[in-house]
Amino acid sequence: MANGKNKSIPITEEGLRLLQDELEHLRTTGRAEVAQRIGDAKSDGDISENAGYDEAKNQQAFLEGRIMELEQKIKFAVVIQNGDTPEGQVGLGRSVTIQEVGYPDRETYLLVGSAEANPTNGRISNESPMGRSLMNKKVGDHISVETPGGTLEFEIVAIE
């Protein structure tokens, strides 16, 4: 989030749209579903010892917390522009293909802000160890990344 410091949050246009879509869904469908669960649980009688009611209220608290988190991310979002990084350099919003030195496999990642990072979908944060190592590098550059298993070395083979 903005960490209470009014810090701008770099994000791609697609990432911002996804956050806005999720927020709209939670405000409408999500709230309606939770309200229905609370109503159903209340209709079961005494709410002082009603596990269904307690669970629905917990879901409501979680939902409202997520809505607040999304509102803050959107409020401080700064859309990454393609021209923010010189052509041929790794930067936010750019795809980079790397190859671990000594291995044939290549991996491609999209470098994004932490608000939309999802490594399992190939979106790594510029604040992650890999992301920090890649920033402002060019094709042919080598980077080292510290991992719990030791240091890994990669070569940058393509930037888009």
Image (cartoon, rainbow, N blue to C red):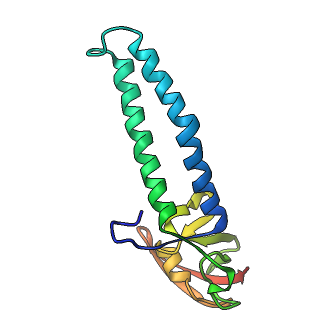
Q: Quadrant of the N terminus?
A: bottom left
Q: Nearer the viewer, residue 24 or 117?
A: 24
Question: Taking 70 as reference, is 109 above or below it?
Answer: below
User: Can you give x and y, in whole percent of width and height, for residue 44 in the image?
Assistant: 40, 9
Residue at image coords 48%, 64%: 75
Residue 98 sits in which quadrant?
Answer: bottom right
Question: Taking 91 as reference, is 70 above or below it?
Answer: above
Q: Nearer the viewer, residue 84 or 141?
A: 84
Question: Taking 108 as reference, is 139 above or below it?
Answer: below
Q: Residue furthest left?
A: 48
Residue 137 sits in which quadrant?
Answer: bottom right
User: Can you give x and y, in whole percent of width and height, for residue 64 in the image?
Assistant: 42, 42
Q: Nearer the viewer, residue 8 or 88?
A: 8
Q: Residue furthest top?
A: 45
User: Can you give x and y, in whole percent of width and height, for residue 112 in the image?
Assistant: 58, 70
Residue 53 sits in which quadrant?
Answer: top left
Q: Is residue 23 left or right of residue 95?
A: left
Residue at image coords 66%, 63%: 14
Residue at image coords 70%, 83%: 157
User: Can you give x and y, in whole percent of width and height, for residue 85 in the image?
Assistant: 63, 87
Q: Quadrant of the C terminus?
A: bottom right
Residue at image coords 65%, 75%: 103
Number of numbered discs overlaid on the protein picture: 0
Q: Is residue 137 left or right of residue 95?
A: left
Q: Nearer the viewer, residue 71 or 139?
A: 71
Q: Is residue 152 left or right of residue 160?
A: left
